[in-house]
Structures are given as C-alpha cells and as structure tokens.
Image (spheres, rainbow, N blue to C red):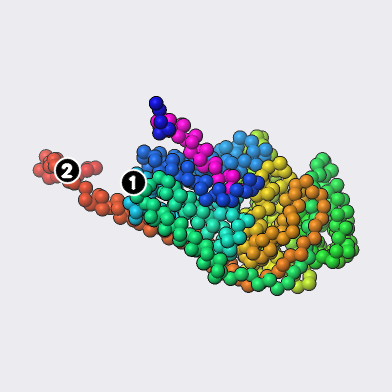
Amino acid sequence: MKTFGDWLASPWRRSLFAALAGALPVFAFPAPSLWWFAYVALVPWILLTRSAPTGRRAAHDGWFGGLGFMLTVHSWLVPSLSVFIVVIAALLGALWAPWGWLVRRFLGGVPSPRRGAAALLVLPSGWLMVELVRSWQGLGGPWGLLGSTQWQVEPALRLASVGGVWLLSFLVVAVNVAAAVLVSVREVRVPAVAGLVATAAATSAAWVWSPRPDVDGSVRIAVVQPGVIAGDDSGVRRFDREERLTRQLADRHVDLIAWGESSVGFDLGKRPDLARRIAALSKETGADILVNVDAERSDKPGIYKSSILVGPKGLTGDRYDKMRLVPFGEYIPFRSLLGWATSVGKAAGVDRRHGTEQVVMSVGHGLRVGPLICFETAFPDMSRHLAQDGADVLLAQSSTSSFQHSWAPEQHATLAALRAAETGRPMVHATLTGVSAVYGPSGERVGPWLGTGASTTRVYDVPLAHGITPYVRYGDWPVQGSLLILALVCAGEGMRAFRLRRTAPRPLVPPARTVHESPARPGR
C-alpha cells in the first residue's frame, strides 16, 4: 500500500501539494476573515518543506507554495489580467524559494533544540524579507501581508502601533513555526513552547505599556458613495448623482465631505463649470469637498489621479497627485516588453503619470488631512510620513468597482484599520462603489461600513487623537531586526562552509609530478 510520502515522491504531485498548502492563508483575509486561522495556516506548508530530501527540493516547495499564495490572494485580478496572473504569481512565488531552503535548513530531519529555537527567529525573518521585497511598488506592492489578517483583533492593533504590520507578520509566522514543531519534532517542543510563551508575553506587554492615542476631540466627516454607474456616459451621470447626494448634507453641520477615487472624470481646469458646481455644493453644505480627478491635466501633459480640495470660493489650490500607481491597472511596467498584457485582459491602455510628493491639506476649522489614493493605503510608510507631517486625519479615496463581486473591496477597506492603528490617527476610507469605512485612532471601527450595494451618504463622528506612536517614531524596526538576523545566519553559514573546507581530509594519492619534477599546478 502506498503511503502519502510515496505519493509525494512525484515532483509534480509534490509541487501541486505545495501550491495548495501555500494557498491556505487566503482564508484568514477578508472576506472569509478567519483571522485565527492565520496562526496555523502555514503549518502544512512548513511540514512539507521540512521533509524535502534536498535543499533544492525545499526551495522548489517554497517557490510553488509562494505561487499558490500569490495566486489566491490576488485571485480578484483574474478578470483584469486573465492568464497573465499565473505568470505574475509564478514570478513572485520565486521569492519564497530561499525561505523554503531556510525551513529545511533549520527544521529538517531531527533538529537540535538550538536549531529549533533559532528557527523561531530565522523563519519569520525570512518571511518578512519576502514581504519587504514584494512590497516594492513595481512588484505589485504590499497587498496581502500576513499581518494584515489581524485588522480586527484589538491586541494585534496595539502591536501594530509598536512595530507596524511587519511586527504582526513576524509574530504570526513565529506562531506557525512553533505549531509545526509541536506536531512534528518532539525533541524541539520545549523551545517551541517557550516561543509561544514569549509571543504571548510580548503581546501582553504591548497591551499594558504601549502608549495609547489621547482622544481630544472629534470631527464630522461625510462620505459620498454613488454606487455602480456603468455606460459610455457614466462620468456625467456619476457626477450628477454625487451632486444630488451631497446636497442632502446641507443641514448636517459636517466639517469635510469626501468623494471617492475617480469621482470626477474631467479635469477641472478644462471644465470650470464643474468646478463652480462643486464650489456651490461646498457653500451650501458649509464644508470643503475633497474630490478625486482622473483625467488628462490642462496644465501639464499626461493623465493623473489627483485629490483636489474645493471650497465655497472654488479650487483652494491644494492638490495631491497619486504617487504609487497600480502595476498593469494604471500603467504597464516595461510597456515595450509587456504591452501584450492589454490583449489578454483589462490592463491599462495608457499609462498614468505619478506625483512626486505627499501633501497635507488644511480644510478649515484647523483640521489637517493627509490624502491617499486607493492602492496607497497598502503602504505603511506613506501613512506614517503623513502622520509625521502633521496630518490629523488620514483620508483614502478608492474605487474597486471592477472587482465588486470579489473579496477585494472588503480586503481593501480593512487596510485602513491597520494604518490608523500604526499612526494613532483616524482614517476614512471613501469609495465610489464600496466598501467605505472609518476607523478611529486605535484602529477600531467607527460606525457601519457602506457595502458594495449602497448608493448613499454617511456622516461619521470621527475621534481625533494626537501624540506619536512607537511605529511613527521608530519606523520599520522589525524589518531592520530581521535583516540583522539573516545577516548573522549568512555569516554563520559562511563560517561553517569555511570550517568544512579547512577540516576536509587531504587526498591519500600524492600529487602528480611534471617532467621537471615539480608538483603540477592546476590550471597550468
């Protein structure tokens, strides 16, 4: 009778199982949002990889597991990229090949307690390096970081204020490693239990001692969500609906009104009539309106996505141009080489231009707002810089209308909870078609979500807080610590290889002699 190990002897079957194991963490992300599953989701992948017969096979297990992870976490991109998503997932999945090698190096066979204890630091560090590299905007950005599965867990949000989403990812992987050791390696169970106790102690310490945002006021911010509007004249009809919805806010005493991403499909410099209509709305409601324009600019060449503030007297002059664009969705990297992607999906036909600097806008009443546009909410460094620059509120304008019936809208909305917790600043996530959401300065939800079926407005009483969180002050220190750990590992492996060469037995056969009775020199 064949065992499961015999079944895995086939490289293709083993690769398939690795891809399936790598796909498991997707259930910890919204919409399933089984946050607790994140702490054991990597265990099958780790158990498979540690059993690899060679380091090369372990690297392959890491690669195919990474392919499965990237493919499922980004599955909502299939309508836009078609089969090209498989190519992207395969390329990015290769980032996990070194992590697979590390799994076997530290957990393969019967590891010593020392090696097992080291795995609790090395493997989370290796995972963090994968997340760091793929967080580069050109590789797709930090969508689907493992730590972001903990967006609704209060102790985890407190940890995010200390070390950002990076610290959460590190701890989640560490718990997975400890769980894998507990079920598979009896000799290393003591370090595994010690690691779990240390993780619990760190969480408890952060809960007790990390500074909490000091809530010292509130502001009323209205979100205008027009809903799905399709057709050739959708830009005109969307603006009309946004105008009607905004008029309903006339007697609500709001301080700011936020429209979603691409809420205005025309450059306001070319369409002063639209600018006057928005200014009239601002005067009628008594609040500035932050709109978002997706159009070719009148003052410089190219199409930009821009957050533009409009007051009762017209354009205030405050403008933020989106800096980090969505690969393939808003531009095609190396278009001369990859431009064919437009023929197999809905990749960008024309590249958008990117902005050059972040902006903090003053919207009256002493309120300072830091705008982000769509994809940028996935980048913790951007919200951190806005907090450092004095933003009182982080405000994201987004649109996931192309992915209405997928998990993308909910997953996107939850990122704002992490950005709020990291910075100690409330965050408003305003969308065209849902999900719109608001979070307080500790990452707690404020009011209800506006789902993908809503076409309405909602006024939120947003708590304001000041002070500096450890993450804003010290930045990505978990990443720096992981780099140091991996540098020590590389140094140790180098010394180990050097000692092996030094202690290798010398050949018993005497060296060959040349005709001149001198030892032969290799390569001569």
- Residue, x 56% and y 62% (percent of image)? 159
Secondary structure under the numbered disc 1 in the rendered image: loop
Residue 146 horizontal/vertical position (percent): 55, 51
Residue 261: x %, y % from top left? 74, 53
Segment colored magenta = 6-29
Residue type at mark 1: give it: Val
Q: Is residue 87 above or below residue 399?
A: above
Q: Nearer the viewer, residue 91 or 284?
A: 284
Residue 360 seen anywhere in this rendered image of the structure? no
* Side of 523 where 61 appears, left or right: right
Crowd class of label 1 (few under 14; some 14 to 19; many from 20; radius 10 Å): some
The quarter of the image holding the N terminus is: top left
Instruction: Name the residue at 86% across, 54% down.
Output: 245
Image coords of residue 165 (percent x, y): 56, 58
Residue 24, label in figure: none
Percent coordinates x, y for residue 474 in the rendering: 54, 68
Residue placed under numbered mark 1 in the picture: 110
Residue 307 occupies quadrant: bottom right
Q: Are marks 1 and 2 in contact (CB under 8 Å)?
A: no
Residue 327: in magenta span: no
Q: Which mark is residue 507?
A: 2
Cα separation, mark 1 vs mark 2, equals 32 Å
Q: Which circle, 1 or 2, is nearer the viewer? A: 1
Is residue 16 a member of the stretch shown in magenta?
Answer: yes
Instruction: Answer above or below: position of 391 versus 79.
Output: below
